[in-house]
């Protein structure tokens, strides 16, 4: 090879003749060892390239996993939004205030007496949508809870399982009780 890299480096003055000969001998020794004894000489550059490719593949897999999780989260959010928007009751700011707990805060919405009674009995639920509260049927609320539990603010379904005795069954709640 008249135009090998070693010759080009020699012409450029980057190496001298002895360094060039030493490098050629080292390379030929490695080649002879590899050919004769079938011993694989460790190539640091190839090893480093394989390692960096493996690291890049791991980073790519992690990035793909995060993107997939984000896409799934957005799909669930869209489903919840659609369920609430399609099934919410029309807001006709009623005359009766209904208090409910949102996290640690007590909130109040005004609804009609009929909606208030249904909320108290657990037939309706309250869902949070874009910093607003919407009244939805409890059947829809159960579907939303399966997707994202944090959207349902109030669902007054009885905590007692069927077959359990209610310790307060003998005490009647007055009809006019508001909290």
Image (spheres, rainbow, N blue to C red):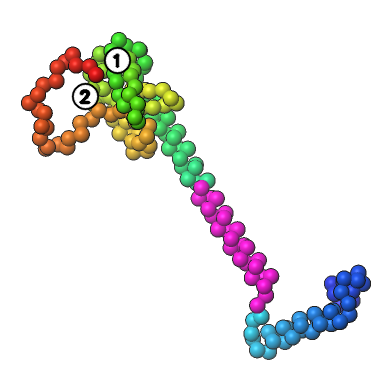
Disc 1: which residue: 97
Quadrant of res 129: top left
Label of residue 111 in the image:
none
Residues drawn in magenta:
42-66
Compare residues 168 and 84 and report the one nearer the observer: 168
Residue 4 visible at all = no
Above or below 73: residue 175: above
Rendered residue at 17%/37% (across/down): 161
Query: Would you say residue 63 sits in the magenta stretch?
Result: yes
Secondary element at tag 2: helix
Q: What kind of secondary structure does the magenta stretch mostly adopt? A: helix
Above or below 57: residue 127: above
Horizontal and vertical percent for residue 154? Answer: 30, 28
Does label 1 or label 2 sit earlier along the sequence? Answer: 1
Query: Would you say residue 45 sits in the magenta stretch?
Result: yes
Using the numbered discs, state the Cα–Cα distance from disc 1 to disc 2 in whole angstroms: 15 Å
Residue 168 visible at all = yes
Numbered disc total? 2
Compare residues 87 and 9 and report the one nearer the observer: 9
* In-image side of 123 versus 58 (left or right): left
Quadrant of res 103: top left
Rendered residue at 87%/71% (across/down): 14
Disc 2: which residue: 121
Horizontal and vertical percent for residue 90? Answer: 36, 17
Name the outermost residue toward the top.
95
Compare residues 112 and 19 and report the one nearer the observer: 19
Horizontal and vertical percent for residue 99? Answer: 29, 20
Q: Quadrant of the C terminus?
A: top left
Horizontal and vertical percent for residue 88? Answer: 36, 22
Rendered residue at 21%/24% (across/down): 121
């Amino acid at each position: 090879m008249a135009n090998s890299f070693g010759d080009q480096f020699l012409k450029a003055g980057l190496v001298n003749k002895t360094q060039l000969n030493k490098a050629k001998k080292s390379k030929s020794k490695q080649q002879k060892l590899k050919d004769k004894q079938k011993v694989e000489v460790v190539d640091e550059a190839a090893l480093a390239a394989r390692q960096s490719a493996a690291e890049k593949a791991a980073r790519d897999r992690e990035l793909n996993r995060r993107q997939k999780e984000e896409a799934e989260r957005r799909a669930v959010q869209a489903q919840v939004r659609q369920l609430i928007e399609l099934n919410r009751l029309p807001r006709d700011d009623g005359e009766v205030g209904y208090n409910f707990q949102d996290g640690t805060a007590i909130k109040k919405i005004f609804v009609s007496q009929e909606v208030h009674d249904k909320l108290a009995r657990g037939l309706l639920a309250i869902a949070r949508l874009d910093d607003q509260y919407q009244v939805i049927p409890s059947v829809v609320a159960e579907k939303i809870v399966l997707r994202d539990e944090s959207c349902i603010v109030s669902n007054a379904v009885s905590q007692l399982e069927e077959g359990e005795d209610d310790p307060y069954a003998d005490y009647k709640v007055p009809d006019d009780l508001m909290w």
